[in-house]
């Protein structure tokens, strides 16, 4: 019983903390919308806060969240020197759908695709929408699964913590 309790403690408390302590590394590759392989470190730069938003074309809450990020992108970029990167988890066969969605929405930030779920597996998350906030050193400092209207203000509060 004590072993099981300890194991549950490790899985429930320590593991999420280890995931948050992760750094984005050069071996994390995705594709741009032209189908070229790119390193995520081309978008997550030292000295800059980055918000990674994982989404899918079939996910309505994902698109709502990206629309929200789009509406704040210019002011947050100016106030917080933040870069937003939207990474689609759609399969490679859905690339045209990802492109048409991004064009239709006219999102001002970079849109990438993770057709082999490289990031999905490396960052160990199970569903979208999924947000990772990365500090100026490349360390993941905040993550959130799902999207609700009331999450809007709390995300900016997390960003503000990084510049204080």
Image: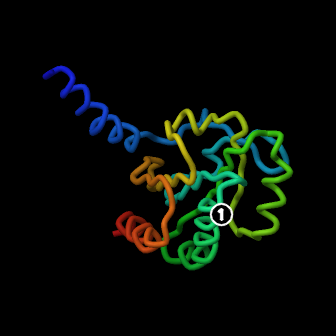
Name the residue at 52% across, 42% down. 24
Position above or below: 4 against 145: above
- Residue at 71 percent across and 69 percent down: it is 108
Would you say 95 lies left or right of 17 here?
Answer: right
State left or right for residue 143 relative to residue 39: left
Considering only vertical position in the picture, is 112 above or below 74?
A: above
**Residue 118, percent from left and from top:** 63, 34
Q: What element carries label 1?
A: helix
Above-or-below relation of 6 to 53: above
Q: How is the image coloured?
A: rainbow
Give the position of the N terminus as an image quadrant. top left
* Extreme residue toward the front, this view: 1
Q: Mark 1 points at which residue?
A: 63
Residue 104 figure quarter:
bottom right
What residue is shown at x 78% (from left), y 53% (from top)? 98
Left or right of 132? Residue 15 is left
Quadrant for residue 53, please give it. bottom right
Number of marks in picture: 1
Quarter of the picture holding the C terminus: bottom left
Across and down, in percent, residue 6 comes to 19, 27
What percent of the width, then of the height, locates residue 14? 28, 36
- Quick check: 71 above or below 48? below
Q: Residue at x 68, y 51 (%)?
A: 56
Answer with left or right where residue 138 lies relative to residue 36: left
In the image as oriented, which residue stretches furthest toward the left? 2
Residue closest to the eye, 33 or 124: 124
Q: Residues within 10 Å of mark 1 (few under 14, many from 20)?
A: some
């Amino acid at each position: 019983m004590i072993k099981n309790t300890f194991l549950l403690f490790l899985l429930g408390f320590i593991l999420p903390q280890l995931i948050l302590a992760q750094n984005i590394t050069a071996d994390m590759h995705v594709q741009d919308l032209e189908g070229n392989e790119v390193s995520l470190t081309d978008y997550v730069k030292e000295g800059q806060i980055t918000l990674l938003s994982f989404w899918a074309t079939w996910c309505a809450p994902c698109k709502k969240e990206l629309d929200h990020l789009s509406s704040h992108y210019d002011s947050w970029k100016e106030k917080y020197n933040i870069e937003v990167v939207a990474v689609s988890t759609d399969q490679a066969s859905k690339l045209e759908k990802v492109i048409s969605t991004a064009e239709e929405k006219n999102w001002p930030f970079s849109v990438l695709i993770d057709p082999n779920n490289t990031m999905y597996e490396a960052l160990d998350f199970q569903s979208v929408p999924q947000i990772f906030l990365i500090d100026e050193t490349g360390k993941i400092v905040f993550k959130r699964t799902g999207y609700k209207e009331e999450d809007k203000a709390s995300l900016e509060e997390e960003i503000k913590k990084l510049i204080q």
